[in-house]
Image: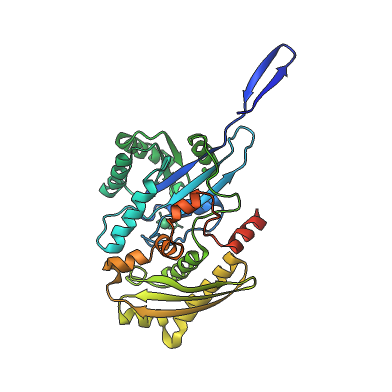
Amino acid sequence: MRVSFAGVQGLRSEVCFSMPFRSGFVCILGRPNAGKSTLLNALVGEKLAIISPKPQTTRNRIQGIIHIPKRNGRDGGQVVLIDTPGVHKPDSSLGRKMMVEVREGLEGSDLVLVLMDVTRKFDPRDGYAIDLLKQAGTRAFLVLNKVDLLRDKAKLLPVIEDYRKLYDFAEVFPISALKRNGLEEMLKKVVAALPAGPAYFPEDQVTDQPARFMAAEIIREQILMEMEEEIPYATTVIVDNFEEGARLTRIAATIYCEREGQKGILIGKRGGMLKKIGTSARLRIEKMLGTKVFLELFVKVQPGWRDARGFVEELDWRRQLEHAMGIPVMNAAVSGHAGPASDAHKKRTNKRR
Ligand code: GDP
Ligand code: MG
């Protein structure tokens, strides 16, 4: 630790301890649709997680890295935010896998942000998230989201009281992840709550997700936007081929659904729907990678895939990477390997900073 001495008006000397670099893992926990992914994107300043008004959009946990330079009155540090699927009672292999992702996100985290949607009344399903938190016993902040939709802010007080009876929250923050209100203040407290520690990721890395997984998620996001009822839930996307060049990236991906009827809707009249999904996904992937993209999409029926444990496990990109690299992915990131985010994505991110 650096110790500096500064004379004040020639009368006395003050000892100023330089502030340590703080770092740690911060898990965002909450019900489906509370705004967890919106919060992750807002805090990192990048579109890392897909978002939709439909519940259970996020299926895998995602890390977003916030690099904080030391500034007046604020510690420097690195916050590894973990976005998790919404806490729910699972009724399929996919749902159970999503809850495993939540538990693994919580495991070993230094701080938990319990995110709740203030426009919804407290119900037993909120208690389920608190139960998970109690099992982990981690220090936690209560984050009341979507306050932009609340006319009467006084209504927050009884909600805070109810939550405080359930867990000893260290801080409470009313925020709007969408409008980015209250985030600076909260982030300051998050950093201050973390232990002194090293940077876990290099400064130019903003996520642990490989670009090919982010591409699959972007395609899935377009499906969520275009499709109604059961189809978004019965659909998943796997990137079969991803060849990143300096100017052109070639991607081939398969959209899996559960029934022939769903396949027909996804393809649409004369392929119109698939073309629409493909075009909007391609434009977004091009923006992310900073290269032109050639995107080929296929639709396949995989009856009952949500309940096929083996298939669901194979959807996990960490699992896919472990197979490809022969090493556990978490260790790769922490031990200082550059991690799996694409070079093009990192470079583009740097330019914007
Ligand atoms: P998640 O399931 O918890 O990850 O929730 P998402 O981040 O996908 O958001 C669910 C929905 O809530 C989306 O339609 C978001 O635009 C919306 N949302 C998230 N945060 C806010 C907020 O602060 N205010 C408002 N009005 N809407 C929000
Ligand atoms: Mg989400």
Residue 190 at x, y percent in the picture: 49, 39
Q: Is residue 189 above or below residue 262?
A: above
Furthest residue toward right: 10
Residue 204 at x, y percent in the picture: 60, 53
Furthest residue toward bottom: 270
Residue 192 at x, y percent in the picture: 51, 34
Count of marks placed on residues = 0
Residue drawn at point x = 40 percent, y = 58 percent: 60
Residue drawn at point x = 47 percent, y = 65 percent: 213
Q: Is residue 256 left or right of residue 247?
A: left
Pick the residue in front: 327 or 190: 327
Pick the residue in front: 314 or 150: 314
Q: Is residue 122 left or right of residue 140?
A: left
Q: Quadrant of the N terminus?
A: top right
Ligand 2 is found in which quarter of the picture?
Answer: bottom left
Q: Is residue 169 above or below residue 277?
A: above
Q: Is residue 226 visible?
A: yes
Furthest residue toward top: 11
Q: Is residue 117 visible?
A: no
Residue 31 at x, y percent in the picture: 35, 51
Colour scheme used in the picture?
rainbow
Q: Is residue 306 left or right of residue 297?
A: left
Pick the residue in front: 333 or 263: 333
Rendered image quadrant of residue 329:
bottom left
Residue drawn at point x = 28 percent, y = 49 percent: 125
